Image: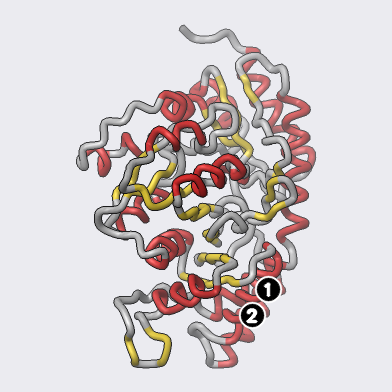
Amino acid sequence: MIAIAKPLIGEEEKAAVLEVLGSGQLAQGKRVREFEERFAAWVGARYAVAVSSGTTALHVALLAHEIGAGDEVITTPFSFIASANCILYAGATPRFADIDPVYYTIDPASIEQQITRRTRAIIPVHLFGQPADMTAIAEIAEKHGLAIIEDACQAHGATLNGQPLGTWGAACYSFYPTKNMTTGEGGMITTNDAALAERMRILREHGMRVRYVHETLGYNFRMTDLQAAIGLVQLTRVEAWNAQRQRNAAQLTARLTGVPGVVTPQVRPGATHVFHQYTVAVADRDRTIASLSERGIGYGIYYPIPIHKQQVYRERGYTDVLPAAEAASQQVLSLPVHPALTATEVEQVAEAVMAAAREPMVV
C-alpha cells in the first residue's frame, strides 16, 4: 500500500521523548521555549508562540488582535474548516472570498468585494503548501487598515519572492501528524510584533503572565515538552523532507503533464511550494480513484465540500455562490507526494493516473 501520508518518526525523536519523560518536566517548559526560539529563527520571525494545535493557533491569533463580536474576517471557503471556525470561536463573523482557480488560494479581487465597514482582518490560507498572493493581499490590507493572519498550517518553509511566510502578519502553523513536520499534535504562531506575541502567551495559559495572577480570560492551549522534543528533532529534518517532496512533485508533473483530463498543480511565480499535498484536477475523479484503489495507492480529496456549504454554515444562513471554490471541490484529487516515497512508488502513482486517463470515459 502506498499511503497518501506517512509521518516520519525515527529513533532520535523517540530518544528525545524518553529524555523528557525521565526529566519529570512534561508540561510546557524549557523544551517548548527552545522549540519556539528555533522555529522563529528558521522561518525568519522575531517571535514564536507554541500552542496545542493549528486550530488553537488561529483562535489565539484572532483573540490577540482583539477581534470579536461585531467584527468580520475574510477567508477562503476552500480549506479545512478550522480556517473559518476559528473566526466563530472568537465571536466574529466569517466572510468568504472565492479562490484563484489556478492556484486554489484566496483571490485578492474577491477579497476586495467582501470588505465592509466591519471587516477587521484577512486570513489567507497557503493551501497545499502553496503561498497565497501575499503581495496583493498586503496591499489590500494596508489600504483598508486590516490585520493579516496567515494560515500556514500546510506550508512549513514556504516562501514568496524570497520572503518567508509570517512576515506579512502573524502566521499559524500546525504540527498534526500528516503535516510536513509533526509533534504528534501542536501548533505555532510566528510574528514580528513583540506586544502581539506577549498577548498570545498570556491567552494560551489561562490569562496568566505571573502564575495564579489572571489578567484576562485565557485558555489552556499549551504545548507540552514531549511535543516540543519531537518538534526540535523534526525541525532539523524538515528542509530535507521538503526538498524530497519537491522532487517527488517534479517527477509526478513530468509524467502527468499533457495527460488528457489531468491538470497538474501550478507553482505561483516567485513561490517556494513545499507540497504538503500534490493536488491535481481530474475530469473523472471516480475513475481515477478506482484506478488508484485497484493498485493499492492512497489518495485524498481536499476538500469535497467548501466551507460555506457545510451544514454548520448553512444553518447560520450562508448562501454564498463561489464558483471557483465549488468547481475545485468537484475536481481536485491529492496524490501521494510525501518524502518516504521511492522513485519507483512515485512512478506507480503516475501510472495509475495515466491508466485511468486511457480508459473510455463513462457517460
Q: Is 84 above or below relative to 182?
A: above
SS at badge 1 = helix
Looking at the picture, does residue 239 appear above or below residue 106?
A: below
* Badge 2 density bin: few <14, some 14–19, many ≥20, Cα 10 Å: some
Element on which disc 2 rests: helix
Q: CA distance from mark 2 to mark 1?
A: 6 Å
Q: Are the two marked residues, 2 and 1, in contact with CB atoms closer than 8 angstroms?
A: yes
Residue at image coords 56%, 44%: 139
Residue 186 image offset from top left, x and y in percent: 50, 67
Residue at screen point 21% across, 37% down: 317
Q: x, y percentage for residue 358?
A: 65, 13
Q: Mark 2 highlights which residue?
A: 34
Work out whether 167 lies above or below 334.
below
Residue 156, can we see it? yes
Side of 269 relative to 312 (left or right): right
Q: Percent position (x, y) of residue 350?
A: 70, 29
Residue plotted at (67% across, 51% down): 158
Asked if one can make out residue 3 in the rendered structure from this viewpoint, the answer is: no
Given residues 116 and 261, the one toward you in this image is: 116
Give the amino acid type for the residue marked by disc 2 in the picture: Glu
The answer to whether 255 is drawn above or below residue 139 in the figure is above
Question: For residue 203, which quarter of the picture?
Answer: bottom left
Residue ID for mark 1: 38
Q: Amino acid at mark 1?
A: Arg
Which is more toward the observer, 277 or 35?
Answer: 35
- What residue is drawn where x is 51% and y is 23%? 285
